[in-house]
Amino acid sequence: MKWHDEIFNSIDIHQPGWEKLLMESKVKIKTNQSEVQFTVVEKILQKFGLRVTDVSFTDYYGIVIGIEKL
């Protein structure tokens, strides 16, 4: 199982509206929300040993958060 599959299985339980997005071989968390409490994201980062690589917002995707393993 790829490392991101385990993460997104967990996210699906706690944040069912969030999805995995693969862009240019990079793993990203896609939301359809215009706001996200970063404490929710921080819990995910700590639990799985991740860091944020980038954050962006578009009307189409909502908030997109790039992640990678530490």
Image (spheres, rainbow, N blue to C red):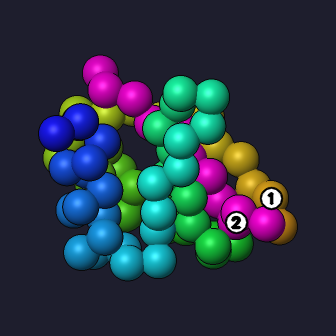
Counting other residues with Cα less than 10 Å from the Cα at mark 1, is it few (<14), some (14-19), or many (20 or more)? few
Q: Is residue 49 above or below residue 44?
A: above
Amino acid type at image mark 1:
Thr
Q: Is residue 29 above or below residue 69?
A: below
Cα separation between marks 2 and 1: 5 Å
**Prevailing secondary structure class for the magenta stretch in the rendered image:** strand
Residue corresponding to mark 2:
62
Judge by depth and name the residue closer to the eye, 67 or 8.
Answer: 8
Q: Which residues are magenta?
A: 60-70
Q: Is residue 15 above or below residue 54?
A: below
Question: In the displayed image of the protein, which residue is found farthest to the top?
Answer: 70
Kindly identify which numbered label has been placed on residue 58: 1
Asked whether residue 46 is in view, the answer is no
Residue at 19% x, 49% y is 6
Asked whether residue 5 is in view, the answer is yes
Quarter occupied by the N terminus: top left
User: 68 left or right of 12?
Assistant: right
Residue at 80% x, 59% y is 58
Are the residues flagged by discs 2 and 1 in contact, CB closer than 8 Å? yes
Residue at 31% x, 26% y is 69
The kind of secondary structure element at disc 2 is strand
